[in-house]
Amino acid sequence: MKPTINFSPTISIVLPTHNGAQYLKQSIESCLKQTYPNIELVIVNDGSTDTTVEIINSFNDARIKYISLPTNKGIVAALNKGFSETTGEFLSWTSDDNCYTVNAFEVMLKTLENEENIDFVYANYHMIDVNGKVLKSGHVENPQGLDRDNYVGGCFLYRRKVYEIIGDFNAEAFLVEDYEYWLRVRAQFCMKKLDDFLYYYRMHGSSLTTAHGLEKIQDQVERIRAAYISPWKQDFLIGKRFFYKKDFSKSRTFLLKSLTMYPFYYQTWRLLIKGILRK
């Protein structure tokens, strides 16, 4: 028998926005037009000076909870304020320039309801331009991929107990606040990737990623990785990176260093032997 979805749980979506009026309406609509209707949308206006207020006020929907911060506090503060006001049994957040597919939360919730051992699910996405044209598709990876980078993406849903135990986002992880949070989640909860494409991630010149530059973001990723990933795994990942750059000498150096700390990881030995054979 095909499982039926229980329409009683509330899904709370936090949407922080700062001067994001250009795409905000589309983002709000994608949350409210879900095939799963029991949505609580918590919009946090982070000191916007554009037409954000007018756009939010144009929606006459009781599912919207509006919070206004008098000055710009930053995305981490906006997220933490938003989540503190949620009431749903399941939680998520999105950006003011991105959109969900119409069935995104129905699909993700169905997995969480059918698999009680899973606490956090996340899905693939499409990258779009300013006009909504699909540029390419992005595939998320299994939770182990977080050792290398933020492979969770922007489309996810998790149980409230995750938030209650993990707590707030970290202000010191600006630009990679989500990555740092996912690493904390992975350490205590069961995460699962879905093969569905349920999200549209917009590429444009005003996005945080573009504005701050990939190099700065990567520096933050490296700092966060060093704080949460064991030293032997870090050396393995560096050795692996040099291996695929065909710098086998540097690769061996880091792989051997990794083995001195943890000699039981098969992949380290495999890469080391392959590198020796190719020198």
Image (cartoon, rainbow, N blue to C red):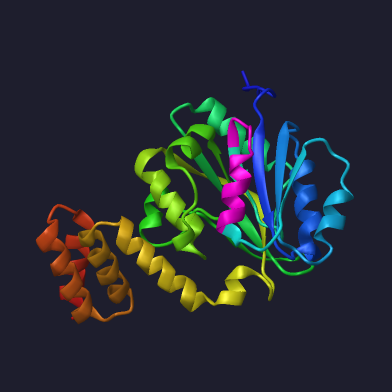
**Prevailing secondary structure of the magenta residues:** helix
Residue drawn at x 12%, y 59% is: 261
Residue 181 vertical placement versus 118 (above, below): below
Quarter of the figure with residue 204: bottom right
Q: Is residue 155 visible?
A: no
Percent position of residue 161, x then y: 48, 32
Q: Residue 249 in the image: x percent, y percent? A: 19, 81
Q: Residue furthest top?
A: 1
Q: Where 202 sits versus 15, above or below?
A: below
Report the front residue among 4 and 6. Answer: 6
Quadrant that contains the N terminus: top right
Q: Residue at x 50, y 39 (%)?
A: 163
273 displayed left or right of 61: left
Q: In screen coordinates, is 160 left or right of 5?
A: left
Q: Is residue 79 magenta?
A: yes
State the residue in front, 5 or 223: 223
Q: Depth check: give the residue in front, 182 or 1.
A: 182
Corner quadrant of residue 187: top left
In the rendered image, the vertical position of residue 269 relative to residue 108, given as above or below: below
The quadrant where residue 211 appears: bottom right
* Residue 109 makes an appearance in the image: yes
User: Does 232 sit left or right of 47 as displayed?
Assistant: left
Q: Residue at x 28, y 70 (%)?
A: 238
Q: Is residue 124 left or right of residue 206?
A: left
User: If the image is split into quadrants, where does the C terminus sit?
Assistant: bottom left
- Range shown magenta: 76-90
